[in-house]
Amino acid sequence: MFRPTMRQVTSSDTRIVAHKSAGLAAQNFMLSMSGIGYDTCPMEGSDTLMVKNILNLPYNSEINMVIGCGIRTKEGIYGDQLRVPFKDVYRYI
């Protein structure tokens, strides 16, 4: 009664909470990487069987996402970078 515990939840509920928590941790990681001058790219939909094999993870483990990290070139990867103007996506209320 005086400890924070999960009650009346299924293992599926716990799994979903774990994935959400991992996503929030990934967001924190990406913001921290940006703060020290690196760019990141979250990649969902990766070949998780291959990732588990490379990292020697158990077959029943789950991959939330793969994050690429590096230093951006001024030219971009495939050419000039296209950015939507900030004023088109932000509105002060």
Image (tube, grey):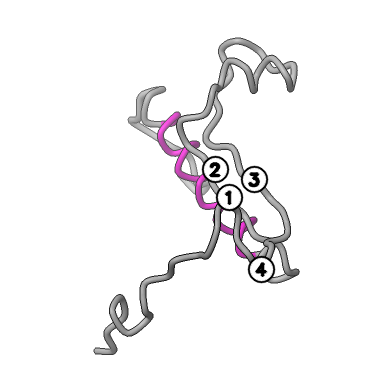
The residue singled out by tag 4 in the image is 74
Image location (x, y in percent) of residue 21: 51, 45
Instruction: Name the residue rendered at 58%, 19% in the picture.
Output: 61
Q: Earlier in the sequence, mark 2 or mark 3?
A: 2
Q: Is there CB contact under 8 Å for labels 4 and 3?
A: no
88 or 22: nearer the eye? 88
The amino acid type found where label 4 is placed reads Lys
Instruction: Name the residue rendered at 71%, 62% in the picture.
Output: 38
Dividing the image into 4 quarters, which one contains the C terminus? bottom left
Q: CA distance from mark 2 to mark 3?
A: 16 Å
- Is residue 24 placed above or below 87 in the rendered structure? above
Q: CA distance from mark 1 to mark 2?
A: 6 Å
The residue singled out by tag 3 in the image is 68
Q: CA distance from mark 4 to mark 2?
A: 31 Å
Q: Is there CB contact under 8 Å for labels 2 and 3?
A: no
12 or 41: nearer the eye? 41
Mark seen at residue 26 = 1
Q: Main secondary structure of the magenta part?
A: helix
Instruction: Name the residue rendered at 69%, 71% in the picture.
Output: 35
Q: Is there CB contact under 8 Å for labels 1 and 2?
A: yes
The amino acid type found where label 2 is placed reads Ala
Query: Which SS class for mark 2?
Result: helix
Residue range in magenta is 14-31
Neighbours of disc 3 within 10 Å: few (<14), some (14-19), many (20+): few
- Is residue 93 placed above or below 17 in the rendered structure? below
Depth check, mark 1 against mark 4: the one in front is 4
